[in-house]
Image (tube, rainbow, N blue to C red):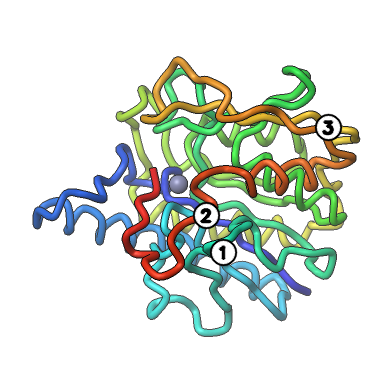
Amino acid sequence: MKIYIQTDIEGIAGFCFFENRKDASIENFQHRQRMRKLLTNEVNAAVKASFDAGAEEVLVNDSHGSGYNILFEELDPRCRILHGRNCSGPHWLPLLDSSFDALVLVGMHAMGGTPCAITPHSLWKINNGEIFLSEGSMAAAIAGDFGVPTVFVSGDDKITDEISKKIPRLRKVATKQALAPFQACSLIPAKSCERIYEEVREAVARRKEIAPYVIRGPVTLSLLDSENHAPPLVEVQAPVTCDTVSEAFFQYENTMSWTHFNQRDPDGFVFP
Ligand SMILES: [Zn+2]
């Protein structure tokens, strides 16, 4: 059994504002290290749960910003990690295919424009507003095209609500109750890890009871966001229409400016 763990950082217990990648202060450095450690612990809980539920292979995708957040020296050595960024794209969900048995989402954030959610951003609009997707539910839809069910999500109460409405039988852990874009009532990290372990183990064991999340094509897709992720959100670029959501996503992503950066200087690339 193979499990793919897609990760982001905004949805972990303890996170309530974006890092500042240009701030070289000790305070900012310490804050970022702390968030990386908390993320690593939540991911480790999901990895251990997957193996304990019978997985033979677990692939972790470090997907926030630079793709270089998880303290991989501390990860369970039985898994493998995907990290860094491809200068010519696509960056998202590398190696995900129909050989996986389930997708697990850790640390997700709500879609752009969600009221009272922690750092909501990225609003994927399908067929002129027939369906709206967060980054988490977009990952679920891409996995769905491969026939892979999404069995678990963790993040604030807004993203776990959104995804569990789309995939009713998936297991979830609300790591925090979001009160505003930068304020939450959070589980203490040790409790969050304990809950993630319990629910992921259950979710992976029951993966066959959860249907893949499939959006029927053709699909017209666009992304709404803004430079600082705050409203009003605008279309990042013109919509694309394809037979499947996966094709539309990768075609759209490949034309986005942040997908292409100087191949000799990836460190100089500043991700929003
Ligand atoms: Zn992120």
Of the image marks 2 and 3, the number of the one nearer the N terminus = 3
Residue 133 pos. (x, y %): 66, 32
Label 1 crowd (10 A; few <14 / some 14-19 / many >=20)? many
Q: Can you name the residue that lies furthest to the left here?
A: 26
SS at mark 2? loop
Residue 122 to residue 64: above or below: above
Q: What residue type is labelled 2?
A: His
Residue underneath mark 2: 260
Crowding near pointer 2: few (<14 within 10 Å), some, many (20+)?
Answer: some
The label on residue 61 is 1
Whole-Å distance between the Cαs marked 3 and 1? 26 Å
Q: Where is residue 192 in the image (x, y as percent from the top left)?
A: 43, 51
Q: At 50% across and 65% down in the image, what residue appears?
A: 45
Rendered image quadrant of residue 213: top right
Name the one closer to the observer, 10 or 90. Answer: 90
* Mark 1 residue type: Asn
Mark nearer the N terminus (3 vs 1): 1
> Could you tell me which quadrant the N terminus lies in?
bottom right
Q: What residue type is labelled 3?
A: Val
* Residue furthest out toward the bottom: 77
Q: Position of residue 179 (x, y in %)?
A: 37, 23
Callout 3 secondary element: strand
* Residue 149 placement, left or right of 82: right
Residue designated by label 3:
219
Confirm or deny contact between disc 2 and disc 3 (CB under 8 A).
no
